[in-house]
Amino acid sequence: KRLEVVNHYFTTDDGYRIISARFGVPRTQVRTWVALYEKHGEKGLIPKPKGVSADPELRIKVVKAVIEQHMSLNQAAAHFMLAGSGSVARWLKVYEERGEAGLRALKIGTKRNIAISVDPEKAASALELSKDRRIEDLERQVRFLETRLMYLKKLKALAHPTKK
C-alpha cells in the first residue's frame, strides 16, 4: 500500500490531502512515505518491526542533525529511515531537558509517559508523596463516614424515642 500511495503521488498532480483521503491514511503519513522514498527508494518504505527501538547513539546523531544542520523533524526521520517524526520530536524534547544522558536513559518498550528512567531518590520521594496523599484522603473519608454514622444514629433516636 505504501508503494501504491507513493506511486500515485509521483504519477498524478494530486496533493497530500487528496491522496490521504483517497487511500485513507493520514496526510502526514503520505508526506513521510514520499520523503522516505525520495531519500532511500523502495527500501525506505519497508515497515519497521514493532517494538524495535533506536539505539542511543542513533538518537543522539538524529537530534544533533536537527539542531546543527537545521533539519526539520520530517527531514531527519526520512534521512535516518525512522518510521516518523514523532520519535524525533520526543528525542529532541528529552535532549533539551536532560541532554545526551537523557537520550541514553530512554527505556525500550515502555509507555511514553514513563519512558525516561528517573532518579531513584526522586522516584522514592514521589511514591512517598503519593502514599501521604492517599493516607490523607482515606482519613478524610473516615471522618466523613463517622460523622454520617453519628447523624444517622441521632436521626434514628429522634424518630423512635424510647419511653422512660
Image (tube, rainbow, N blue to C red):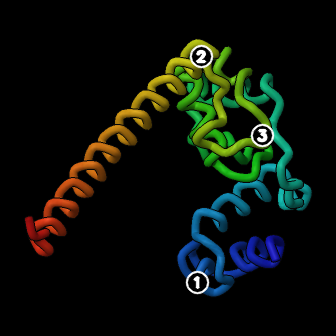
Q: Amino acid at mark 2?
A: Gly
Q: Quadrant of the C terminus?
A: bottom left
Q: Residue at x 21, y 54 (%)?
A: 150
Where disc 3 sits, the SS reads loop
**How far apart are the alpha carbons under marks 3 and 2?**
20 Å
Q: Which mark is residue 99?
A: 2
Closer to the N terminus: mark 3 or mark 1? 1
The residue singled out by tag 3 in the image is 80
Q: Amino acid at mark 1?
A: Ala
**How far apart are the alpha carbons under marks 1 and 2?**
40 Å
Give 78 or 125, whichever is nearer the viewer.
125
- Residue 113 x %, y %: 58, 41
Q: Amino acid at mark 3?
A: Phe
Closer to the N terminus: mark 3 or mark 2? 3
**Contact (Cβ within 8 Å) of mark 3 with mark 2:** no
- Residue 107 x %, y %: 75, 32
Q: Which mark is residue 21?
A: 1
